[in-house]
Image (cartoon, helix red, strand yellow):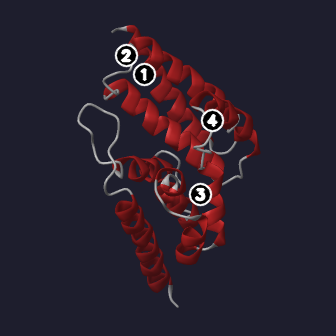
């Protein structure tokens, strides 16, 4: 297979992951006032990895698009593996919170598990936090108080601290987004 054929196959495989995630998240909405389509978030995470992080690894980008499917839909790990392979399934599982636990416990576990994430999962976690900070600052859930938004930014710092060293460019981007977010929230 020549490199053009390989590139086409990679593109098709990534688009297959986007289509799969779109179907799985089709009825879900974000918590912002406009109730934007949920799929915007995983696509934004993959875009941040590619653009700000310079990541071209197909499996990482696919896992980014799929990162919330097990946690937030009826998708099973077996489905992910059957469609996208063991590596992608493992990455998605690394990103999956245990929804049977309370919010505070899930947040604490993300902090504790961040240093233990694989080299591919750490950038996904950082990009996820960047995308969420942008949403919390620019399009917050209507019921979130100013204090809750600041607390969310503080929490992301603790999670990202455990992921540092994985992708310096993405980490710098996180730092910039966090700084701008703090400035915006301080001005409101």
Residue named by callout 4: 106
Report how far apart the C-alphas of labels 2 and 4 lie in the structure. Answer: 27 Å
Give me the residue at 54% from left, 71% from top. Answer: 79
Residue named by callout 1: 181
Q: Nearer the viewer, mark 2 or mark 4?
A: 4
Q: Nearer the viewer, mark 4 or mark 1?
A: 4
Say whether residue 160 is visible. no
Q: Tell me if residue 40 comes above or below residue 141 in the rendering.
A: below
Say whether residue 54 is visible. yes
Q: Callout 2: few (<14), some (14-19), or many (20+) C-alpha neighbours within 10 Å?
A: few
Residue named by callout 3: 92
Q: Callout 3: few (<14), some (14-19), or many (20+) C-alpha neighbours within 10 Å?
A: many
Percent x, y for residue 119? 70, 52
Q: Nearer the viewer, mark 4 or mark 3?
A: 4
Could you tell which of marks 4 and 1 lies nearer the N-terminus? 4
Q: Callout 1: few (<14), some (14-19), or many (20+) C-alpha neighbours within 10 Å?
A: many
Could you tell which of marks 3 and 1 lies nearer the N-terminus? 3
Give me the residue at 34% from left, 40% from top. Answer: 30
Residue named by callout 2: 184
Q: Tell me if residue 150 comes above or below residue 67 in the rendering.
A: above
Q: Secondary structure at mark 2?
A: helix
Could you tell which of marks 2 and 4 lies nearer the N-terminus? 4
Q: Nearer the viewer, mark 2 or mark 3?
A: 3
Give me the residue at 36% from left, 67% from top. Answer: 19
Percent x, y for residue 20? 41, 67
Report how far apart the C-alphas of labels 2 and 3 lie in the structure. Answer: 32 Å
What numbered label is drawn on residue 118?
A: none
Q: Secondary structure at mark 1?
A: helix
Could you tell which of marks 4 and 3 lies nearer the N-terminus? 3
Tell me whether the residue at label 2 lies in contact with that at label 4, contact meaning CB atoms closer than 8 angstroms: no
Percent x, y for residue 150? 48, 16
């Amino acid at each position: 297979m020549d490199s053009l054929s390989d590139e086409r196959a990679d593109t098709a495989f990534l688009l297959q992951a986007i289509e799969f995630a779109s179907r799985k998240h089709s009825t879900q909405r974000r918590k912002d006032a406009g109730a934007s389509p949920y799929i915007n978030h995983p696509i934004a995470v993959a875009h941040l990895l590619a653009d700000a992080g310079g990541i071209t690894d197909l499996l990482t980008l696919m896992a980014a698009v799929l990162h919330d499917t097990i946690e937030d839909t009826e998708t099973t790990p077996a489905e992910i593996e059957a469609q996208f392979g063991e590596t992608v399934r493992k990455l998605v599982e690394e990103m999956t919170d245990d929804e049977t636990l309370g919010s505070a416990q899930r947040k604490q576990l993300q902090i504790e598990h961040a240093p233990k994430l694989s080299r591919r999962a750490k950038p996904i976690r950082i990009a996820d936090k960047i995308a969420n900070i942008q949403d919390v600052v620019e399009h917050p859930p209507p019921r979130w108080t100013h204090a809750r938004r600041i607390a969310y930014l503080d929490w992301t710092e603790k999670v990202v601290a455990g992921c540092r060293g994985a992708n310096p460019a993405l980490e710098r981007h996180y730092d910039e987004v966090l700084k701008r977010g703090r400035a915006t929230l301080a001005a409101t």
